[in-house]
Amino acid sequence: MRIVTIIGARPQFIKAAVVSRAIKAHNAQSTSIIEEVIIHTGQHYDPNMSEIFFEEMNIPKPNYNLNINGKSHGKMTGEMLFSIEDVLLETKPDWVLIYGDTNSTLAGALAAAKLKIPVAHVEAGLRSFNRQMPEEINRLIADHVSSLLFPPTQTAVNNLVNEGIEKNLENVGDVMYDASLFYREESKNKSKILKDLNLKKGNFILSTCHRAENTDDINRLKNILEGLAEVSKDTSIILPLHPRTKAIIENNGLQELTNLLTVIEPVSFLDMIQLEENAKMIITDSGGVQKEAYFFKVPCITIRDETEWVETVEAGWNKIVGADKTRIIDAVQTTDFNKPWQELYGDGHAGERIVKILLG
Ligand code: UDP
């Protein structure tokens, strides 16, 4: 069996690492070998947004690197579609495996579906019900042209069923949970980030901000940075800054708002786990980070108007505050997060299940 995996952005490297590891494990004990061909679209290309994940998480080197980035949505998706089609015609896979909700996901789904190659979508069925988000458009289309869908939660299953997708759904759990459990120990042993930044468990807040809805609206971005600045007067805030957010802050002269924050370059996954696990609280607009906060039982404040990961909110571990300075400050000071915790995202074996189902 030959599988073509299409990835291009940071969260996809982390998700694909889980399935690649499961493929390797399968190949080590079976005669029906799976060949995995990896296409890296190049959407994320900075070494600390891409290469570091391949090295640290032992992801096989991409067979194809398309180097497509820094363009408008249409141009980027169009160029990817064009190039991915060539690779699919050359490699003739049995399955195309796509992850999440980026332009790489959309281009991979369309290229394969048009060639009548079955598409399997890992992390299917997530919905924010906000079509202003580029990710929501990517998810909707990717799900509707996929032949096999791996929704990670019952909510995601329900979303698909509500859209008329009732067959070939397998809730295998969340590969991100697999990743967090698998790399947690290694992170404890190898990461030096707490020492380097002079941090102790519970004496800092971790924050990330990169969603277009926050970075492309200067008013929202200002509100978030002002909220963080105020909070950091009490508890120091570590902000590993996405390159896009960094550029927008600089281009709009907002650097002063970050003076009180500890702004650092994006960190590796092992470092990120240490920061998450030891933070007093997490303030983020990232999908993956909201869940990791839950995995590590760390309270989360989400600087968005809605979330796809509604279970974390219902469980009382995540609070949605929008991009509103006052609500951010208020949530940090007053929210009681001391709630029961249960496994909501599978059991840490989603990757193995995906491989088994692909094999049929
Ligand atoms: N992440 C990381 N280093 C960072 C910031 C995030 O390793 O400096 C990881 C994080 O732990 C999570 C994933 O990247 O697993 C989330 O990616 P991102 O926030 O870019 O995308 P989203 O999840 O919102 O799609």
Image (tube, rainbow, N blue to C red):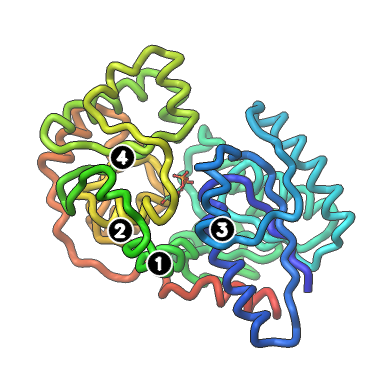
First in residue order: circle 1 vs circle 4: 4
Q: Which structural element holds mark 3?
A: loop
Marks 1,2: beta carbons within 8 A: yes
- Count neighbours of disc 4 (C-alpha within 10 A) and say few if under 14, some if 14 to 19, many if 20 or more: many
First in residue order: circle 1 vs circle 2: 2
User: x, y (%) of residue 78?
Assistant: 76, 35
Looking at numbered disc 2 in the image, what kind of residue is underneath it?
Answer: Tyr
Looking at numbered disc 4 in the image, what kind of residue is underneath it?
Answer: Ser
Residue to which mark 4 is pinned? 207
First in residue order: circle 1 vs circle 3: 3
Quadrant of the frame with the N terminus: bottom right
Residue 125 visible to the viewer: no
Residue 345 numbered tag: 1
Q: Is mark 2 within 8 Å of ligand 1?
A: no
- Foreground mark, 2 or 3, reads 2
First in residue order: circle 4 vs circle 3: 3
Looking at numbered disc 3 in the image, what kind of residue is underneath it?
Answer: Ala
